[in-house]
């Protein structure tokens, strides 16, 4: 089994378009740090994915233990990203799911393997879970305000063979 840690945005983005189950189908289980759970569960109104994070057996919440690393990462990142990176290091995760550029930059510097929502869509197509990436990516852009440059959009479609 592939051990995967996720930040908030991949969960909320996929949940917003009713595609959160792609993570379960690809990875069987997703681990989120306590800060990600708290970000989603403590808001006055539910965000996409909140109910799933609170009730799905395949989404596990764990506390990042290295508080010194978390504090250091928080100098540049938010608490969810900081704990996701720290937890991925602690449990030697095979993959970190993270979309924001600053977090991805730091993950790369720390030699973590990571992907974002678009990488998840490519993996889902490769495994035959979805047949086309384009309509799902378009749905992300329209319904979840997911931002992607035209260059990246075209590159993803090329990789997907669409």
Image (cartoon, rainbow, N blue to C red):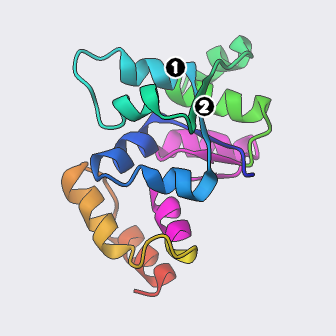
The residue that mark 2 highlights is 84
From the top left corner, tell me how far across and down residue 75 is, in percent.
Answer: 56, 20
State the residue position of label 1.
Answer: 35
Name the disc covering residue 120, or none: none
Q: Residue at x 45, y 45 (%)?
A: 10
Residues marked 1 and 2 touching at CB (< 8 Å): yes
From where the camera sits, is residue 77 visible? no
Task: Please tell me in which quadrant of the rendered image residue 104 appears.
Answer: top right
Q: Residue at x 52, y 62 (%)?
A: 119
C-alpha gap between disc 1 and disc 2? 8 Å
Identify whether 119 is placed above or below 83: below
Where does the image place residue 78, in percent across and percent down from the top left? 48, 24
Q: Is residue 27 magenta?
A: no
Residue 134 lies left or right of residue 127; in this view the side is left
Please give the range of residues in magenta: 95-124
Q: Is residue 87 above or below residue 15?
A: above
Q: Nearer the viewer, residue 161 or 56?
A: 56
Label 2 environment density (alpha carbons within 10 Å; few <14, some 14–19, many ≥20): many
Residue drawn at point x = 45 percent, y = 61 percent: 118
Q: Position of residue 161 (x, y in %)?
A: 46, 87
């Amino acid at each position: 089994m592939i051990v995967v840690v996720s930040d908030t945005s991949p969960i909320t983005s996929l949940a917003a378009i009713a595609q959160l189950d792609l993570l379960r189908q690809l990875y069987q289980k997703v681990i989120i740090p306590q800060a990600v759970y708290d970000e989603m569960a403590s808001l006055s109104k539910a965000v996409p994915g909140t109910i799933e994070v609170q009730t799905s057996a395949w989404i596990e919440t764990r506390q990042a233990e290295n508080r010194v690393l978390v504090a250091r990462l928080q100098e540049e990142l938010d608490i969810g990203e900081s704990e996701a990176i720290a937890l991925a290091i602690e449990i030697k995760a095979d993959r970190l799911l993270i979309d924001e550029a600053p977090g991805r930059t730091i993950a790369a510097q720390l030699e973590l393997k990571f992907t974002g929502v678009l990488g998840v869509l490519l993996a889902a197509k490769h495994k035959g879970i979805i047949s086309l990436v384009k309509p799902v990516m378009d749905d992300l852009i329209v319904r979840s305000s997911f931002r992607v440059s035209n260059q990246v959009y075209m590159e993803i479609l090329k990789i997907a063979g669409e």
